[in-house]
Image (tube, rainbow, N blue to C red):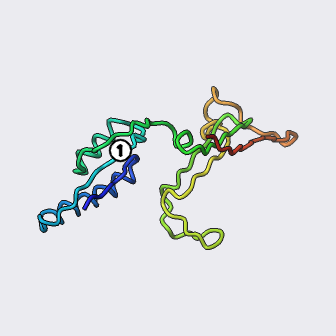
Amino acid sequence: MNLLTVVGARPQFVKAATLSRAIARHNAARPGAAVAEKIIHTGQHYDANMSEVFFQELEIPAPTFHLGIGSASHGAQTGRMLEVATTEPGLQFYSGNFLDGSITGKGGRVYRRRTGLCLETQHFPDSPNKPQFPNTILRPEQTYRSKTVFAFSVSN
């Protein structure tokens, strides 16, 4: 039997490592019913050197084929893009790394680790203490205005 495994980014490497170990155990226990694993590497990992580390440290057999698609941003690879334009000098990025499944959101969806992101336009966090940063002091007679536009697009 032949089995085709496709890898390209970190989650696929982790899953492929488990599968490759199971195939190796199966082949050792049943030499007459061996499974031939063929690995296709898309080449989409952001760092070619890290791809090699994944193959070595996770003990995944070397790829049979390398498509060489190349690394680029996730948006460039999938065609999904988000552009942010703002009058604010800074942008705070929250990755959702600390979501643990204990929060339930809209429609009963559970928020797990890295299941979302937040982009918050703002002044720099330590602005009041850094004279070289844009001023954040708002006097009672002043009005604070800020504009942020999020533009979503899909490219081919």
Q: Residue furthest right?
A: 141
Residue 135 percent coordinates (x, y): 71, 32
Q: Amino acid at mark 1?
A: His
Most foreground residue, 96 or 6? 6
Callout 1: SS:
strand
Q: Nearer the viewer, residue 65 or 85?
A: 65
Residue carrying label 1: 41
Query: Which residue is painted at 50% across and 56% down in the image?
Result: 114
Q: Residue furthest bottom?
A: 108
Q: Quadrant of residue 155?
A: top right
**33 to the left or right of 128:** left
Category of crowding for the residue at label 1, using alpha-carbon neighbours closer than 10 angstroms: few (below 14), some (14–19), many (at least 20)? many
Residue at 72 percent across and 37 percent down: it is: 86
Left or right: 105 as drawn, with respect to 115: right
**Above or below — where is 6 with respect to 146?**
below
- The N terminus: image quadrant: bottom left
Residue visible at 39% across and 53% down in the picture: 11
Look at the image and tell me in which quarter the C terminus lies. Answer: top right
In the rendered image, residue 109, in percent from the top left (x then y), is placed at 59, 69
Which of these two is toward me, 41 or 104?
Answer: 41
Q: Which quarter of the picture shows residue 33? A: bottom left
Q: Seen in the image, is 27 located left or right of residue 155? A: left
